[in-house]
Image (spheres, grey):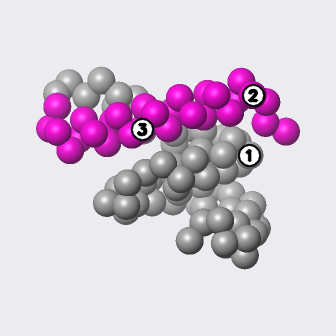
């Protein structure tokens, strides 16, 4: 079960990931939010429940142009490290038509 504190931490991480993406688009250096990418990778590899919460929030919040960028990072890692969990949850979300 994910606590409010965990969900809040996931939301903050998504905020940092989106800020990192904006840094990249704006060619801003130093990239203040660069550690968000590593933190997201660590999270999705370590805990499937928290990783899934991150993926769901990312999908809900990222701009369409950024889908490939995030799919090649957190989503790919999530599927690689937790394939059965990922398949089950992705299928459920798609069948609910909440992620399409």
Secondary structure at numbered mark 1: helix
Q: Residues within 10 Å of mark 2 (few under 14, many from 20)?
A: few
Return the disc, 3 or 1, that comes first in the chain's sequence: 3
Q: In which quarter of the image is residue 2?
A: top right
Above or below, 50 against 74 in this view is: above
Q: Which residue is drawn at 17% across and 31% down?
A: 28
Circle 2 SS class: helix
Give me the residue at 75% from left, 28% from top: 4
- Residue 90 can be seen in this image: no
**Mark nearer the viewer, 2 or 3:** 2
Residue at image point 33% right, 36% down: 20
**Which residue position is annotated with label 2?**
4
Which residue is labeled 1 in the image? 49
Across and down, in percent, residue 51 comes to 64, 46
Q: What element carries label 3?
A: helix
**Image marks 1 and 2: residues in contact by CB distance under 8 Å:** no
Is residue 8 depicted above or below 88 in this figure?
above
In which image quadrant can residue 27 be found?
A: top left
Assign the C terminus to one quadrant of the image: bottom right
Farthest residue to the bottom: give it: 95
- Structural distance between the alpha carbons of marks 1 and 2: 13 Å
Q: Is residue 23 left or right of residue 49?
A: left
Q: Earlier in the sequence, mark 1 or mark 2?
A: 2
Q: Which residue is drawn at 71% across and 24% down?
A: 5
State whether residue 10 appears in this view: yes
Residue 45 against residue 69 in the figure, above or below:
above
> Label 3 belongs to which residue?
17
**Residue 91 sits in which quadrant?**
bottom right
């Amino acid at each position: 079960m994910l606590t409010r504190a965990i969900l809040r931490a996931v939301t903050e991480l998504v905020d940092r990931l989106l800020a990192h993406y904006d840094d990249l688009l704006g060619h801003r250096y130093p990239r203040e939010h660069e550690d968000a990418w590593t933190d997201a990778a660590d999270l999705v590899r370590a805990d499937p429940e928290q990783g899934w919460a991150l993926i769901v929030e990312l999908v809900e919040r990222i701009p369409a142009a950024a889908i490939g960028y995030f799919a090649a990072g957190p989503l790919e890692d999530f599927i690689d490290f937790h394939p059965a969990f990922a398949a089950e949850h992705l299928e459920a979300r798609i069948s609910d038509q909440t992620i399409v």
